């Protein structure tokens, strides 16, 4: 009960979604945002957390921002990666989808998660998601990472930071990467769907309060 009350307080501390989306939108347009010279030269990683039931509104706003950016007048390129789509496309290309369904029936979801991560080489420095982002991110870009809620539990937010972001080549150090997170991030912990606490995480900043 105490945990439920704590999460309720965290959620109530968030401001109106539209206000926070406006704040994020304004921030990514600052030239200083696209340089890794912020807080103590920390990594340029950010989280936009939101209530899970607001997923469709967040997706719609990202779509609007992407369309506006495609006009080429904003001084940078907005790149949006849906992790779920990337993973599913890869598994389909390897004819792995049917195999995972049978594996889940025989061995359970945990075995499927391990098999998928092994196939994507998530534990390796040159894992598939890292290479995909590298290959599809131009210079002077702002990167939005979406779909983490759809990926759960195949891929969790701490794994995106620890296995993907931190394995990006050095030349991407100044590229801002914003993870859109359906849940609560306090800059100390991640609570996915406002229900389950994931691993503690401290090296990304909330892009909007």
Image (tube, rainbow, N blue to C red):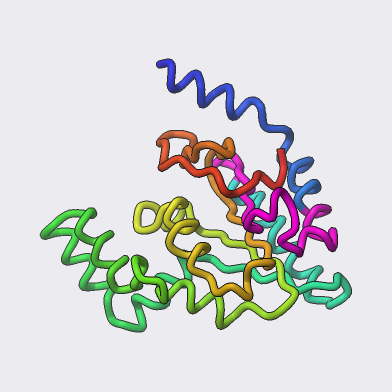
Left or right of 179, for residue 175: right
Left or right of 155, for residue 27: right
Q: Residue furthest left?
A: 106
Q: Residue furthest top?
A: 2
Q: Residue furthest front?
A: 40
Total marks placed: 0
Q: Nearer the viewer, residue 44 or 40?
A: 40
Residue 151 included in the magenta stretch of the image: no
Residue 28 vertical placement versus 91 (above, below): above
Q: Which residues are magenta?
A: 25-54
Residue 15 vertical placement versus 20 (above, below): above
Residue 3 vertical placement versus 80 (above, below): above
Q: Nearer the viewer, residue 46 or 16?
A: 46
Q: From the image, which quarter does the N terminus lie in?
A: top left
Residue 25 vertical placement versus 94 (above, below): above
Image position, residue 141 (x, y; %): 72, 72
At x 56%, y 39%, the residue is 185
Q: From the image, which quarter does the C terminus lie in?
A: top right
Image position, residue 189 (x, y; %): 50, 37
Residue 121 image-quadrant placement:
bottom left
At x 45%, y 51%, the residue is 158
Residue 143 image-quadrant placement:
bottom right
Left or right of 185, for residue 33: right
At x 51%, y 59%, the residue is 147
Image position, residue 169 (x, y; %): 55, 74
Left or right of 66, for residue 115: left
Residue 32 included in the magenta stretch of the image: yes
At x 57%, y 68%, the residue is 81
Residue 114 image-quadrant placement:
bottom left
Image position, residue 172 (x, y; %): 63, 72
């Amino acid at each position: 009960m105490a945990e439920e009350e704590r999460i309720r307080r965290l959620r109530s501390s968030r401001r109106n979604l539209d206000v926070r989306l406006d704040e994020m939108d304004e921030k990514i347009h600052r030239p200083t945002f696209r340089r890794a010279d912020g807080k103590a030269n920390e990594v340029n990683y950010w989280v936009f957390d939101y209530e899970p039931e607001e997923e469709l509104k967040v997706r719609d706003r990202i779509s609007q921002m992407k369309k506006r950016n495609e006009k080429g007048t904003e001084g940078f390129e907005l790149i949006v990666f849906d992790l779920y789509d990337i993973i599913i496309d890869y598994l389909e290309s390897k004819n792995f989808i049917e195999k995972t369904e049978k594996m889940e029936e025989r061995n359970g979801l945990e075995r499927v998660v391990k098999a998928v991560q092994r196939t994507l080489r998530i534990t390796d420095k040159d894992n598939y998601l890292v290479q995909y982002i590298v290959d599809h991110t131009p210079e002077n870009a702002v990167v939005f990472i979406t779909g983490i809620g759809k990926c759960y539990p195949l891929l969790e937010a701490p794994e995106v930071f620890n296995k993907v972001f931190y394995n990006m080549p050095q030349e991407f150090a100044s590229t801002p990467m914003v993870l859109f997170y359906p849940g609560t991030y306090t800059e100390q912990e991640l609570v996915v769907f406002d229900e389950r606490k994931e691993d503690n995480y401290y090296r990304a900043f909330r892009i909007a309060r």
